[in-house]
Structure formats: C-alpha cells, structure tokens
Amino acid sequence: MSQHLQYLTPDTQKAIRRKRGELSLTKDSLAKQLGVSRPTLNRIEGQANGVAVRIDIYKRVSNWLAEHV
C-alpha cells in the first residue's frame, strides 16, 4: 500500500519557522508537539522549495498552525 503524501509549500514552511520563533519553541519541543521526529521537523523546516510529507503529518502541521494564528 502506498503512502499518501501532501505538499507543504515554501510559504507554509516559512510560517512554521516564524511561528516557532514567535513562540520561542525549540525544534525538539515543536517536534514533540507535532508528534514527529527531530529529523522530520528539520526536513520540514529546512528543505528548499517545499516538501512532501505523509498526510497525517500534513494535518498535524496544519492544525498546529491554525491553533497559533
């Protein structure tokens, strides 16, 4: 069975980095809140030109951003 992927745009990646900074969260603490590993968060925040992630991770990231608007 193939994993379904969703694309996080560069704008979404920027919003994640900005919001993490505004909330003074470390990468470790945000990774824990999102339920992802630190390497996964590094890939989400750092990969240029967007990144494809599993749909469950996409939903968690989207929900986190929506909660902290």
Image: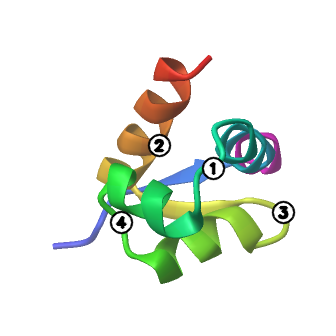
Looking at the image, tell me whether mark 3 or mark 2 is earlier in sequence order. Answer: 3
Circle nearer the viewer, 4 or 3: 4
Q: What's under tag 1, amino acid-wise?
A: Leu
Label 4: element kind = loop
Which is more N-terminal, label 1 or label 2? 1
Q: Are there few (<14), some (14-19), or many (20+) residues within 10 Å of tag 1?
A: some
Region rendered in magenta: 9-13
User: Badges 2 and 1: C-beta atoms under 8 Å apart?
Assistant: yes
At horizontal 67% and vertical 45% (from top left) the residue drawn is: 16
Task: Residue under label 3, please give it.
Answer: 49
In contact (CB < 8 Å): disc 3 and disc 1: no
Q: Where is 62 relative to 69, above or below?
A: below
Q: Which mark is residue 8?
A: 1
Q: Disc 4 designates what residue?
A: 36
Q: Specify few, some or many for label 2: CA neighbours under 10 Å numbering under 14, 14-19, or 20 or more.
A: many
For marks 4 and 1, the one nearer the N-term is 1
Q: Report the magenta stretch's main SS.
A: helix
Give me the C-alpha separation between circle 4 and circle 3. Answer: 21 Å
